[in-house]
Each structure stands twice: as structure tokens, then as C-alpha cells.
Amino acid sequence: MALSNSAGSKGLLQTRELFEYVLETSVYPREPELLKEIRVITANHPQSLMSTSPDAGQLIALLQKLINAKNTIEIGVFTGYSLLLTALTIPQDGKITAIDMNKDTYEMGLPVIKKAGVEHKINFIQSQALSALDELLKDDANRGSFDFAFVDADKVNYQKYHERLLQLVKVGGIIVYDNTLWLGTVAMPEEFVKEELKPTRFYSIEFNKFLANDDRVQISQVPLGDGITICWRL
Ligand SMILES: C[S@@+](CC[C@H](N)C(=O)[O-])C[C@H]1O[C@@H](n2cnc3c(N)ncnc32)[C@H](O)[C@@H]1O
Ligand SMILES: O=c1cc(-c2ccc(O)cc2)oc2c(O)c(O)ccc12
């Protein structure tokens, strides 16, 4: 099924044909049916573009499998594409702490999550992410307890999330940040960038430089979806 949040564009690849080739050849044939359902539901939302792209999602699931992720955290749920992806990937007794200030969008995808039989793995916290993370940090049992974190929310706060996640994610765990290439604008001269994209472009450039110099993590920035940066906690 070709419907996607980003099939109307070429992602970050050279041509739309090449992007569609990757999706049609390697991504959609392996995408679970219920994730496709979340994409269909999300397509009706005016901000459907925000959904994690299936090609990036496929790599995220692979990373989770590789490290046997069991206890995970997600900042930025929206309608639940990345949430369901994680819920389908981790084991039956795995847990996801899923944080979003908007519960209405989470509830759009919830029937599909229930149909998948994975709701029991999810602790949805409706909150500003910073305060939710600070709350988690108050309990010493949470420190170093998470195997995997996925961050896909307000880019202005990524550095603040990073400092907190470094305390919550165990050594050997992984933190993935979405949108680190911000629609390709991080490498465009500022005068060519649409006004509404400029603030996030600025924060993304600063965050990318920060991560490049952070020796608490080993990183790889991957041009899938809108750019994801994988951080391995050292
Ligand atoms: C890009 S969408 C997440 C997409 C999601 N990962 C998916 O696969 O569909 C960003 C989400 O972050 C949430 N968000 C933005 N800023 C936030 C904040 N400061 N605290 C909590 N949630 C926030 C928004 O409500 C929105 O649902
Ligand atoms: O406006 C966007 C677009 C995206 C986006 C673009 C291309 C992809 O392959 C994936 C995602 O992501 C966004 C996002 O995460 C956000 O918080 C706000 C806006 C957008």
C-alpha cells in the first residue's frame, strides 16, 4: 500500500522514484497490517506529516530488536505510529512510557493499539514532556532503567530531553532523535528557508553540533524519514 505520510515527497533522497522504490521494495512489504491501519487513520489528520515515516520506523524496530529493548520511553506520540511499532517489537512483558501533551491524537490510534493486543504494554502520560521526565527522575528506580528512548516532539527542547534521558537510559541503551535534518533545511542557506521553518532549523543545527561533541554517546545521523540521529549511551 503506497499511502504514507511522506510518499507525496521524495523524503531526503535524490528523487521521488528512489524514495518510493525503497518504500515499495523494502519497507511496505514488511510493515505490519496494523501499522498500515494507523497510517490510514492518520492520513485524515491535518498534521499527518508529523507521523514517523515507515522507513525510519523500520530501522527503529531493528535497533530495538538488536538490543532486546524491553523498557522503553517515547516523547511525542501523536496518533501512535511509532508507539504501536515499539509495542509490536518489544516482548509481551515489555513496557513503554509514552508521553504527549495531547491525548486526543493518542486516542485516534488507540483502537488499533487495542486490536493489536498491546495496550497493556503502554503507560500513556498526558503531560509536558519536561515535567514528565523530571517526575520520572524523582524515583531512583527509574534511573538507568530504560533500554531505548525515541524522541519526536518539540525540537526546541531536544537538548533538555537529552540531559534527562542520559540519566534514564542505561549504558548500552539507545536514544533516537527524529527530524534532525528538519526537511533538509539544516544544510540550506537561511535566506532560502521558509520563515515558519527557521526556528526549528536553528534548534536542529545547534542540537546536531551539540551531539557531535557529546562524548557520553556514540552517534550516527541517518537520512531516513526526516533524518534520525541514533545515540548509543556509553
Ligand atoms: C511529530 S509528532 C509525534 C509523531 C509520532 N512519533 C508518530 O509516530 O506518530 C509530535 C508530538 O509531540 C507532542 N509534543 C510536542 N511538544 C510537546 C511537549 N513539550 N510535551 C509533550 N508532548 C509534546 C505533540 O502533541 C505531538 O503529538
Ligand atoms: O512538518 C513536519 C514534517 C515531519 C516529517 C517530514 C518528513 C518525514 O519523513 C517525517 C516527518 O515531521 C514533523 C514533526 O516531527 C514535527 O514535530 C512537526 C512538524 C513536522
Image (cartoon, rainbow, N blue to C red):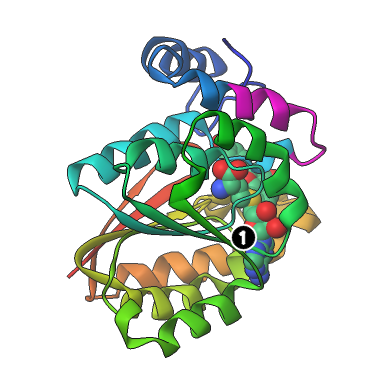
Q: Position of residue 19 (x, y in %)?
A: 49, 20
Q: Position of residue 56 (x, y in %)?
A: 43, 37
- Which secondary structure dominates the residues rendered in magenta? helix
175 over 60 or under it: above or below: below
Q: Is residue 197 visible?
A: no
203 over 58 or under it: above or below: below
Q: Which residue is mark 1?
A: 201
Looking at the rendering, the quadrant in which ligand 2 lies is top right
Please give the name of the residue rendered at 44% of the width and 89% of the height, measured from the top-left corner.
Answer: 138
The N terminus is located in which quarter? top right
Quick one: 36 or 55, which is closer to the camera? Answer: 36
Neighbourhood count class around disc 1 (C-alpha, 10 Å): few under 14, some 14–19, many 20 upward:
many
Q: Is mark 1 within 8 Å of ligand 2?
A: no
Is residue 105 left or right of 204 when viewed as pictured? right
Is residue 46 magenta-colored? yes
- Look at the image and give the residue range highlighted in magenta: 37-47
Q: Position of residue 83 (x, y in %)?
A: 51, 45
Is residue 63 left or right of 192 when viewed as pictured? left
Quick one: 103 or 19, which is closer to the camera? Answer: 103
Please give the name of the residue rendered at 32% of the width and 67% of the height, measured from the top-left corner.
Answer: 212
Quarter of the image where one finds residue 29: top left
197 over 128 or under it: above or below: above
Please give the name of the residue rendered at 46% of the width and 16% of the height, measured from the top-left corner.
Answer: 28
Quarter of the image where one finds residue 174: bottom left
Residue type highlighted by circle 1:
Arg
Please give the name of the residue rendered at 66% of the width and 71% of the height, measured from the top-left corner.
Answer: 127
Is residue 2 left or right of 161 when viewed as pictured? right
